[in-house]
Amino acid sequence: MSTSGRNQVVDTPAALEFMREIAERVNPEDLAAISTALSDKSRRLAVLAGGGARHLDEAAWREVLRSCFPSRRRAGDILERVGKDRLGAAADALFEDGEPLATRLSCFNQMLCDFRSAQADLAFELLHFAAPDRYWLWARWIWDPAAGTGALPLLVGDEVDLGAGLLGAVPGCERVAAYETVGEASAMVAGTVRALGLSREGPFDLDVFLACVYGVYMYTVLRMRMTQEFNRIVPELPQLVSRLLGVHHREVTTCP
């Protein structure tokens, strides 16, 4: 799709305004450091796409779960209730191309029936970071169909129906039905922000940009709804982005 075609569906002024806000809150070096950390995370998770998930021991699975936003605080509970063997078998099946994505996601999410907050989001995060050339990221902070919130709706025009595919979808597979739509919208945003010079060509720079957009949105909402005392405990944008993407570490700095 041409850049002009993308600009018809991407809200370019909104993207530019978000970039201005981002530039005021985070240094370019921090953004580059987060992208590098995501590349390291992807290399660690690549074993999942190669059929090696069932061979991971409990310590390795704990690291995998701790590195993913939906499961980072429930890693111990998931390992205790599900176990590394079931996790490994389900993850290997998730990356098996012989079955439709809906079937693979359904089986993986059934395994996490006791952990509703991790369902769907965890599967999409594992798919994306283990095989970024084949799967894009979709988390609730990117777009939550139930709440109608997230980074993507803030960047695309009204003519883009992010809910396309949801209506009439098989119960329990609604997010799978909309996965292609989310991917297309993400590609449009990526093409536009790169054409505008707002991000690089790295495999995870769109993830960083979307997380920054959501962070700026969060700060705006908090300023309107919360007290100043509460606002002070919210992490600075680099730390917030790192947490959303599962690569939080103490070395990330903030703007002076």
Image: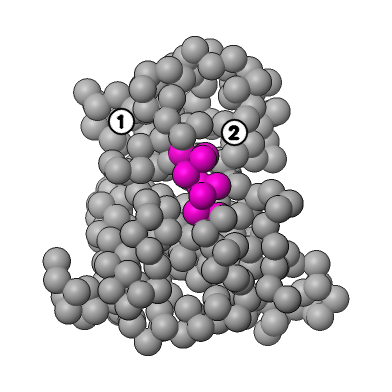
Question: Which of the 4 image quarters holds residue 142?
Answer: bottom left
Span shown in magenta: 34-42
Q: Is residue 153 above or below residue 67?
A: below
- Amino acid bearing label 2: Leu
- Mark 2 nearby-residue class (10 Å; few <14, some 14–19, many ≥20): many
Q: Where's the N terminus, which quadrant?
A: bottom left
Gap in angstroms between the C-alphas marked 2 and 1: 22 Å
- Residue with the mark numbered 1: 103
The foreground one among 40 and 17 is 40
Q: Residue at x 55, y 51 (%)?
A: 245
User: Residue 55 in the image: x percent, y percent?
Assistant: 49, 12
Residue 170 image position (x, y, % from top left): 29, 43
Q: Are marks 2 and 1 in contact (CB under 8 Å)?
A: no
Look at the image and say whether residue 119 sits in the magenta stretch.
no
What x and y, as percent, mark residue 161? Answer: 27, 68
Residue 86 image position (x, y, % from top left): 51, 16
The label number, if any, that marks residue 65 in the structure image: 2
**Residue at the spot 74% in from the left edge and 67% down from the top edge:** 234
Question: How many C-alpha atoms fall within 10 Å of the one at disc 1: few (<14), some, or many (≥20)?
Answer: some
| First along the sequence among labels 2 and 1 | 2
Q: Nearer the viewer, mark 2 or mark 1?
A: 2
Q: Residue at x 34, y 59 (%)?
A: 201
| Image-based side of 6 in relation to 220, left or right | left
Location of residue 176 (image quadrant): top left
- On the rendered structure, is 95 left or right of 97? right
The residue that appears at 40% across and 68% down in the rendered structure is 199
- Report the front residue among 35 and 59: 35
Q: Main secondary structure of the magenta part?
A: helix
Q: In the rendering, which numbered label is found on residue 32?
A: none
